[in-house]
Amino acid sequence: MDFGRFRAVNQVDVTIKAGEFFSFLGPSGCGKTTILRMVSGFIDPTEGVVRIGGSDMRGIRPNMRPTALIFQNLALFPLMPVWENIAFGLEVRGVDKAKRRAKAEELLRLVDLHDAADKRISQLSGGQKQRVAIARALAVEPKVMLLDEPLSALDLKLRQHMRAELREIQKRTGVTFIYITHDQGEALAMSDRVGVMSQGVLQQVGPPSEIYNHPANGFVASFVGENNIFAGKVIAMDNGFAKFETALGTFMTKLGAGIDTSSMAKLYVRPEHSSLKGQGAAHGSGANSVPVEVHEVAFEGNFINIHVRDELGNVHMAQVHNDPNQPPPAPGTRTNLAFAPEHAVVLADTAVRGHA
């Protein structure tokens, strides 16, 4: 999809299954909302085609497509009662009032707002407004529900609650959901599959566990979750593992796809797979170790993030479970950051820029 000389979406080819909860995840400006607008019919692709249920959508106006779009600002009508908001699309289609009311009440039961039919929008909480918007979209019985960052305006607790609500509604209705978000927690928690976007290109598509545990390149690894990152080069490879040479030493690590000794690459290891070991302590057979000094300890409730600094001044993190019987080391403590080869991976340093 081109806007003048700017290519917003570059040769994205993906099939979303009927009844699937699929999320496009990526930073602002990566092309995910442009994809949603092409599916909904608000813009036409400059190349390629959008198909829904096997049918080519070229020339089909938004109101004639089997889709429903929930905007970030919800776009509810404040002067209408809740049930009329939900039934608005049916009114446009000429459905009589009694049937509209019955359908609205059915959908209110579905979204657990059975007693809200005659309330004003202003009387609802943020989460209740979200559910009204979902019910309104479902009223026209779409094949595909399109959601453009609908939870971004909610506070953290409500956002987490609404994740579960959305997923449950999607399961009950069987409608295909296409969800747009820059929040990796949302995408991982709700989706059957996730497509990670960068600079208009689909970098990786897969189940949440695959995206997190087996990222395709450095962009996916660093965007989806936290990582300790070490720059260097591959100096030897053997049976899916590599020797990776850095300014802090040589590490054993798993080898990412397409990496050889000429590749620009970095080593990635998750904080939850990193541990702190006192100098001179055993790290296990073949474990990697970096001398560090504890810089900061951040208490997060059920876990603790321990930020450490290596001898080059780079900051890394080890994440440990909160155990009152094993308090974390104090700032200034000298120790070692350790990680097993099987929990580290060497990946291409840049995101894919060509055909996905």
Image (cartoon, rainbow, N blue to C red):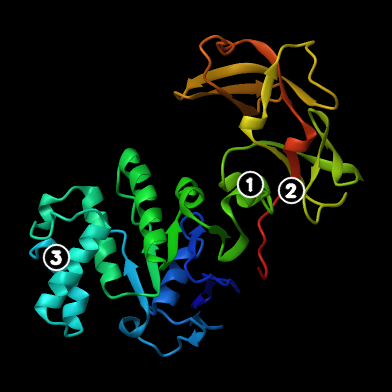
Q: Amino acid at mark 1?
A: Ala
Image x and y of residue 30, in percent: 51, 61
The residue labelled by disc 1 is 221
Q: Amino acid at mark 3?
A: Trp
83 shown above or below 112: below
279 shown above or below 47: above
Q: Secondary structure at mark 3?
A: helix
Q: Residues within 10 Å of mark 1 (few under 14, many from 20)?
A: many
Closest to the observer, 292 or 59: 59
The answer to whether 168 appears left or right of 223 in the picture is left
Which residue occupies 85% across, 42% down? 241
Q: Secondary structure at mark 2?
A: strand
Which residue occupies 56% across, 66% down? 200
The residue labelled by disc 2 is 347
Quadrant for the C terminus in the image: bottom right
Image x and y of residue 225, in percent: 56, 42
Distance in Å between CA atoms under marks 2 and 3: 52 Å
The residue labelled by disc 3 is 83
Distance in Å between CA atoms under marks 1 and 3: 44 Å
Which residue occupies 51% across, 77% down? 2
Chain-order first, disc 1 or disc 3 = 3
- Evaluate whether residue 142 shows in this view: yes
